[in-house]
Image (cartoon, grey):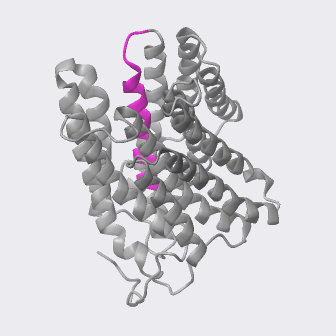
Amino acid sequence: MNEPLRGRAAPAGFALFDLGFRPFYLLAAIFSAISVLLWAAQYSGWLPAAYLKGSVWHGHELLFGYTLAVVAGFLLTAVRAWTGQPTPTGAPLMALAALWVLGRVLVLTPMNTAAAVANAAFPLALAVAIGIPLVRARNARNYFFVGLLVLLGALTLVVHLALQATIELPPRLGLTLGLDVVLFIMTVMGGRVIPMFTNNGVPGAGATRHALVERLALGSVLVLFVADLLQLAPAAVAAIALVGAIAQVVRLALWRSWRTLATPLVWILHAAYAWIVVHLALRALAGTGWIAGSFATHALTVGAIGGLTLGMMTRTSRGHTARPLVADGFELTCFLLVQAAALVRVFGGLASPVLYVASIQLSALLWAAAFGLFALRYWPVLTRPRLDGKPG
C-alpha cells in the first residue's frame, strides 16, 4: 500500500510529528470512524448518553472534534507553505495533538469545566500556532484564519456553558454558528483551490471564476452567519439561504465539474462542494417549514465536510509525502463510501420517516468504513518520512 518513488525504497523512520497534517489527519480519521459508530449505537439505545448528551454530543464532536482536527492539519501545513516560516513540529506539535485528544476524552467524563476549558483552548492554541508565522511573514491575506479560530474557541465555550446552564442560550446555537464558520472556511478555500486543482489535474477543463459570483457566494454565507447569530425569523433565513444556494450553484457550474469525472482526486472536491448547494437549498426549505432542519445540517456535515476533508486529506497527504497526485482504488472506495453515507443520511429519511433510524445506522456504517479505510491506508504514509527524503 505504500508505493515508493520510481527506483527508490521508502525511507525508514517515524515521522508522525514532522508536519501538522500527519498527526491530525490520522487522529481525525480514526476518531471519526469510532465516534460515529458510538453515536449510532447511542441513538439506537444501545449505549447510555455521555456528558454532551444525544445529538449535542454528536454535533459537538463532529464539529469541534473531527472537523477542527482536519482544519488544524491543513492550516499547520498550508501556513508553512504560504509564509516560508516554520509551524509547530516535534514536541510542540505533539503537545497540540495531546490537547485535542484531551478534549475528546474529557467530554465523556463528568469533568464538565475541564472539558470546556480543553475544548476552547485547542482552537486558541492553534490560532497562536499559525498566527506567529503569518505575522512574521506579514501574510495579511490569511490573518482572518486566526480570527475564525478564536471565534470557534468562543463558540465551543458557548456550547459547554449553555449545557451547564451558565448562560441562557440553547447549546444548538453554538453548533449552528460553528457550522456556519466552517461553511465559510470551505467556501473560501474551495474558491481558492478547486478551480486550480481542476485546471492542473484535468487538462482543458477550463474552470473559471467570476468576481460578482465570488462576492455573492462568500457574502451570502457571512450574512447567513449573522442571521443565525441574531436568530432572525425562519423566513428571512430561508431567503438568505436560497440566494446563497443560487450563488454556489453558479460558482460550481463555472468550475466545469462534468469534466472531472475521470479524475477521482478532483471530482471528489466538486461532489463535496455540490453538497453545499444542497445544504443551502434544504435550509431554505426548512425555513419554510417543509422539511426538518436536520436534513440540511447533514447535507453540510456528511456530504460537504465529509467529502471535502477526505478529498483534501488525500491530496495533502500524497503531495506532502512526495507521492503521485493520483487516487488509487483505496481512495476511490473511500470517496464513494462517504458520498453514499451522505445520500443515505439526507435522502433516506426524506424519502420515508419509516427509514429514518435505519438511514442513520447505515450512514454511520458507510462513514466509518470510509474513514476507517483511510486510516488503514494512510497509517504508513503519515507515520513514515517522505519518499524523497526531504523534511516534512
Near-viewer residue (308 or 329): 308
Q: How far across and how far down the image is residue 261, in percent?
A: 37, 48
Residue 246 forms part of the magenta stretch: no
Quadrant (top left, top right, bottom left, bottom right) of the C terminus: bottom right
**Residue shown at the point (55%, 69%) measured from the top left:** 95
Question: Within the image, what quadrant is residue 30 found in?
Answer: bottom left
Against 54, residue 94 (above or below) is below
Position of 345 relative to 323 (above/below): above
Judged left or right of residue 38, residue 156 is right
Query: Magenta stretch: dominant SS?
Result: helix
Q: Tell me the residue at 25%/24% (across/down).
A: 349
Q: List x then y, in percent, for residue 163.
A: 48, 32
Span of residues in magenta: 289-312
Where is residue 209 drawn, in percent x and y?
A: 64, 40
As for residue 291 lying within the magenta part, the answer is yes
The foreground one among 71 and 153 is 153
Task: Identify whether 288 is placed above or below 113.
Answer: above
Q: Quadrant of residue 219?
A: top right
What residue is shown at x 45% (from left), y 48% (from top)?
Answer: 111
Asked whether residue 273 appears in the rendered view, the answer is yes
Looking at the image, residue 336 sits to the left or right of residue 181; the answer is left
Pick the residue in front: 115 or 67: 115
Q: Position of 56 compared to 340: left or right?
A: right
Q: Residue at x 42, y 26 (%)?
A: 296
Tell me, yes or no, if residue 208 can be seen here: no
**Quadrant in which the N terminus appears:** bottom left
